[in-house]
Each structure stands twice: as C-alpha cells, then as structure tokens.
Amino acid sequence: MAQKNIRHYLQFKDLTRDEYDYLLDRSRILKQKFKNYETYHPLHDRTLAMIFEKNSTRTRLSFEAGIHQLGGHAVFMSTRDTQLGRGEPIEDAAQVISRMTDIIMIRTFGQDILRRFADNSRVPVINGLTNENHPCQVLADIFTFYEQRGPIAGKTVAWVGDANNMLYTWIEAAHILGFKVKLSTPAGYALDPAMLDPDARDAYEVFADPREACDGADLVTTDVWTSMGFEQENEVRKKAFANWCVDAGMMARARPEALFMHCLPAHRGEEVSADVIDGPQSVVWDEAENRLHVQKALMEFLLLGRVSH
Ligand code: CP
Ligand code: NVA
C-alpha cells in the first residue's frame, strides 16, 4: 500500500527546479563540511538499506560512506545472498525492509520493479540505477558542472553513444533545469521518444553525426556502449558504436572551455579515447566524488526536509 507524504527519488522529475537549486547548494555545504573534517550527524541512528541486483563500485561506496558520515548506518543486500534472489516478491521485500530501516536505495533492472517496491515502502526509496534511469548520477554530474562553470540553465550538453539510462535522465534533467541535450546514437540504437514525457521532447535534438552533436557544447558526455543487463549484445554493439568514440576531434568541436564527463566505469578506446578521459577537460574524478556529496544532501532532504545549518 502506497504511503502518503513520503518523498521517493525514483527519477529525476521527482524533484522540482526549486528543490534542485536547494540540493545543489546543500551539496556544496556538505562537501565543505566533509573537506573540513566537521562532524555532522543529522541522521544519527538512521539505517539505510542498499539493495543491489546489479554490480556497483561508486554507488555502493558513496551511499555507504555517505550515511555513515551523516551519523547513520548502511546495510548492504544483494540478490546473490538474499531471498530476492530466490523469488521473494518485490512487494513483500519492500514491506519487510521498510519496517526495519529509515531509507532505502535500490539498483535493479526495470523501473517498474523499483516503482512496485516504492509503492509498498513505508520509507523513502532512492533509485540507485535502473535500465531506464540513473538520477543520482546526473545529479552529481550537474553539481560538478555547477562547481566548475556555474548554473547549467541555458547551456548545451552533447551526448555521444547509447540511448541508455544516463541519456534518458539527462533529457529529463534538461527539461526541468532549462538546458539542452544534443545527442547522437548509432543506427539501430536510437532514443525512444515514447519513454519521455511529451513536454521533455523539446529538451533535445538528434544528430546522425556524433561530431555535429558536439558543435558548440558546454559539456560532452558519454557512457559505456553496453550497459549492465545487455552483455549478450556486446560484440554486435562494438561494431555498431565504432564511430561513437569521444575523441580529441569531437572535443575540438565543442566550446574551448567545454568539460568532459563519464559516469564510469569507462572503456578507454571504446566510448572515449584515453587522451580525452585523462586530459585537461575531463572532470571524471570530481564527478565520481560528487556522488557522495549530492547523495548526502538527497538523503538529508528526503528524511529531514530543508535544513539551514
Ligand atoms: N557510475 C556508477 O553508478 O558507478 P557504479 O556502477 O560503480 O555504482
Ligand atoms: N549505463 C550504465 C551505467 C553504469 C553506471 C549501465 O547501466 O550499466
């Protein structure tokens, strides 16, 4: 049974532009506290359940370290060693896990699974990646842009590669925060507009040539050619995506001050050349670190609302 007045974060559109303005500023404050070794425990005694049906390095670590730094505790659960891997209904798992914890993060396959879980949860649920969405990552990316270049409203983001969870989330974010996505995907791997809100369809433009998508961009970003869950397509995808590698030539078509981002893990020589990801325009390490700071701000917001200390 859905619980009233709980805020979940299942996709980017679950928060408003005004709430994102707050969260970006709050992330900056929490990052400063962390850098200053300031003890700050607003979530003292709170427990975060982290459920993983797919692998993770950054998401697991940033959520676990983040709740700890806020005074709380994390419990890691994976499909491999819980009853979820043996067919326990997701609705039943949500009922049980949400009675013992204060907040839950899940990484799973279909967005429908996440939604069914949230509909049966008594506590806030956060999307730690689904096939369709990766909102915590795009939030970290936008915070990284904001730190380096200021507000993203009015800017242009170039997406080169697969029409995956990251791309759909970038477009949703562009619609909410007022920027534009110029995207290019190989033939046969096009974006499906039906997966987007009709309103969000104005937030992007499609280019057949990935170099054209990069023209004048303030940020160039990409992701793996084969996302988790699609591994059996890997060899076919390698051929189809061969020209969708962000290289120095593509970066040269973006604005001179353009940033390069990648949510990681990356494959040098596939979706990005080594000289770009390891070059001066790349901010991938800040981007990865910022998962920690934005998710701390998000957990604090979902549990305590807006705070000012
Ligand atoms: N970017 C990201 O979500 O990384 P992990 O898969 O390591 O969590
Ligand atoms: N699109 C990638 C992101 C990994 C963090 C995937 O879903 O595997």
Image (cartoon, rainbow, N blue to C red):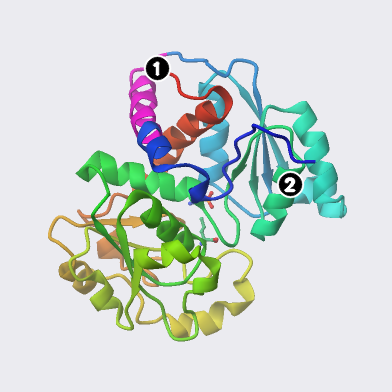
x and y, in percent, of residue 171 in the image: 41, 61
**Mark linked to residue 239:** none
| Nearer the observer, 136 or 22 | 22
Residue bearing the label numbered 2 = 117
Q: Quadrant of the C terminus?
A: top left
Instruction: Identify the magenta region.
Output: 23-38
Give yes or no for contact between labels 2 and 1 (Cβ–Cβ under 8 Å): no
Q: Quadrant of residue 60?
A: top right
Give residue 122's position: percent from left, percent from top: 74, 33
Is 26 within the magenta? yes
* In this picture, residue 16 sits left or right of residue 28: right
Magenta segment's dominant SS is helix
Q: Is mark 2 within 8 Å of ligand 2?
A: no
Q: Could you say whether the residue bearing mark 1 is in a helix, strand or loop? A: loop
Answer few, some or many: residues within 10 Å of disc 2's Cα (few below 14, many 20 plus, some between 14 and 19).
Answer: many
Residue appearing at x 60%, y 62% in the figure: 131
Q: Nearer the viewer, residue 251 or 132?
A: 132
- Look at the image and say whether residue 149 sits in the magenta stretch: no
Identified by mark 1, the residue type is: Ser
Quadrant containing the N terminus is top right
Work out which residue is located at the far front of the displayed protein and give it.
199
281 sits left or right of 305 in the view = left
Q: What kind of residue is marked 2? A: Phe
Q: Secondary structure at mark 2?
A: helix
Q: Which residue shows up at 31% across the image and 53% down it?
A: 178
Q: Position of residue 208 (x, y in %)?
A: 33, 83
Q: Give coordinates of residue 14: x percent, y percent.
A: 53, 45
Label ID, residue 308: 1
